[in-house]
Image (spheres, helix red, strand yellow):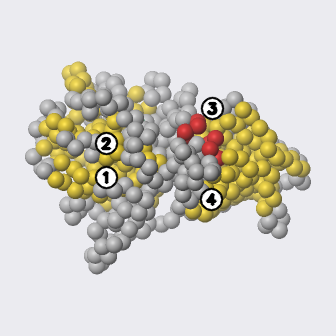
Amino acid sequence: MPDKRPADATVTNPVIPGFHPDPSVCRVGDDYYLVCSSFEYFPGIPVFHSRDLVHWTRIGNALDRPGQLRLTGSPSSGGIYAPTLRHHDGRFWLIVTNVADGEGNMLFTATDPAGPWSDPVYLPGVEGIDPDLAWDEDGTCWVTVAGISQVRIDPYTGETFGPPRKLWSGTPGALAPEAPHLYRIGDHWYLLIAEGGTERGHGVSIARGPAPYGPFEPCPANPVLTHRSSDRPVQNTGHADLVQGPDGSWWMVLLGVRPRGGTPGWHVLGRETFLAPVTWVDGWPVVGEVSPDPAAPPWPLVPGPVEAGRDDFDLGELRPYWISVRDRPEELCTTEERAGCLTLRARGDGLDEPNVVFVGRRQQHLACRVRTRIDPAEGRGGLAVRLDEEHHYEIEVSQGEVRVLGRVGPLRTVVGSRPVPAGPVVLGVRVSGTPVRDARTGPDTLTFGVEEADGTFTALGALDGRYLSTEVAGGFTGRVIGMYAASGTVHFDWFDYEPLAP
Ligand code: 6LW
């Protein structure tokens, strides 16, 4: 093993920026794997790999075929809620709730977390969200859900045994005990939960007991983590999972947000995955600072490959960071029709509709520049920054005209337009995020425009980013920047995402 790292080395939080909430992590040998919620987006449940808990590489999406992920009719922020990832009996297990009608809790397994993952084993006897999966010493399998309640299951058939048992209601007076995770550590079983709701009041609490079904005594220092009632740069900290390193150290992954602009501060990237160190005192965890630059783990960092910012659509398949709204039928979204292009065929809907034909990637940086070369050919489409059907900004081109549009709830606006010659056009958006909290501004400004033949950028319209923030729009996701077809057929030659600030 290379030399130990300098003690003062730091890393950058969030370790997985952008809309990657409700992280769940497990370790197999020296490899860590992590999954997140994905809500109305297809494919669902991004899977990440790391060798150091700091650098994470997206290795796929667990739910990447319609038989695994039915989102028809799901509202924005519906669909796939918090998953739990575990390794047991030589395979990976993923348990998750699809809140879409008729779906509920389900289990998936894989020998390789990069996939393929199995078809779902439905768990009709498990009611509730945020399911956790744990096995006790004799191999009995327990599912624990928000509330906090628990039921015994057969993980191979989905059969449940007996009625749910109430385990713990969390801290008296605290809202919404959820996100349970069970661990056997030393002589105790520990039950980690989130409470206070996923906004500014969010926090993490823990209890311990002699068995996976309790009885549980709460930690006297609960909440063991919260940033509520503070002005720390990371807010909404909660929904955590614990993992032990190969050296015996303990770490917590959790969700947090990075508000920008004046009070209350607006977060635009959704809830992101953060890392914090954990020590144990008197048999209870003490969580270290969830800061933007926490101390690095005491082992060599192993940077992974950096995700390509540019896609020329010449791989024959879409990269795993591309996500669509609810589904992605091949007849409407293909790289086979025109070589080196992504062809999108509208379903007659635009961004305001739930079945828009959209292919995007999570905005993962507070400032970035995104461009795409579009041939409107026989249709209308463009480049959009989407939060949901009612909150999106876009630059759209049809034969001969480019327009900059915005929708915020019931309000729609056109903030710029110009004629363009027929044929391909390079559209762009520059997101200028404020690097720190700035009382005078919103979180950022989104400037849309076209790139001229000589490479210069002509701005056509700028929009205030606070209206594409969760504090305004609500919901559980974050911005996704991508390409869409509003009518007919449009072709995208390339897409380029350039970070300008973390
Ligand atoms: C998640 C639950 C929550 O299932 O939000 O507010 C849900 N808390 O833990 C979606 O992230």
Q: Which mark is first along the chain, 1 or 4?
A: 1
Name the residue carrying label 4: 368
Local crowd size for mark 2, using a 10 Å CA cut-off: few (<14), some (14–19), many (≥20): many
Q: Is residue 393 left or right of residue 49?
A: right
Q: Quadrant of the N terminus?
A: bottom left
The residue under the point 14% across, 32% down is 215
Name the residue carrying label 2: 204
Local crowd size for mark 1, using a 10 Å CA cut-off: few (<14), some (14–19), many (≥20): many
Residue at the limit of the structure toward the bottom, as seen here: 3
- Separation of disc 4 and disc 2 at Cα? 32 Å
The residue under the point 21% across, 29% down is 167
Name the residue carrying label 1: 252
Q: Which mark is first along the chain, 3 or 1?
A: 1
Kindly indicate whether the residue at mark 2 contacts the one at mark 1 (C-beta within 8 angstroms).
Answer: yes
- Separation of disc 2 and disc 3 at Cα? 34 Å
Q: Is residue 120 left or right of residue 382?
A: left
Label ID, residue 354: 3
The residue under the point 23% across, 60% down is 249
Q: Nearer the viewer, mark 3 or mark 4?
A: 4
Residues 104 and 499: in front is: 499
Inspect the image, locate mark 3, and give the three-letter code of the amino acid beneath it: Pro
Q: Is residue 310 left or right of residue 346?
A: left
Local crowd size for mark 3, using a 10 Å CA cut-off: few (<14), some (14–19), many (≥20): some
- SS at mark 3 in the image: loop
- Separation of disc 1 and disc 2 at Cα? 11 Å
Inspect the image, locate mark 4, and give the three-letter code of the amino acid beneath it: Cys
Q: Nearer the viewer, mark 1 or mark 3?
A: 1
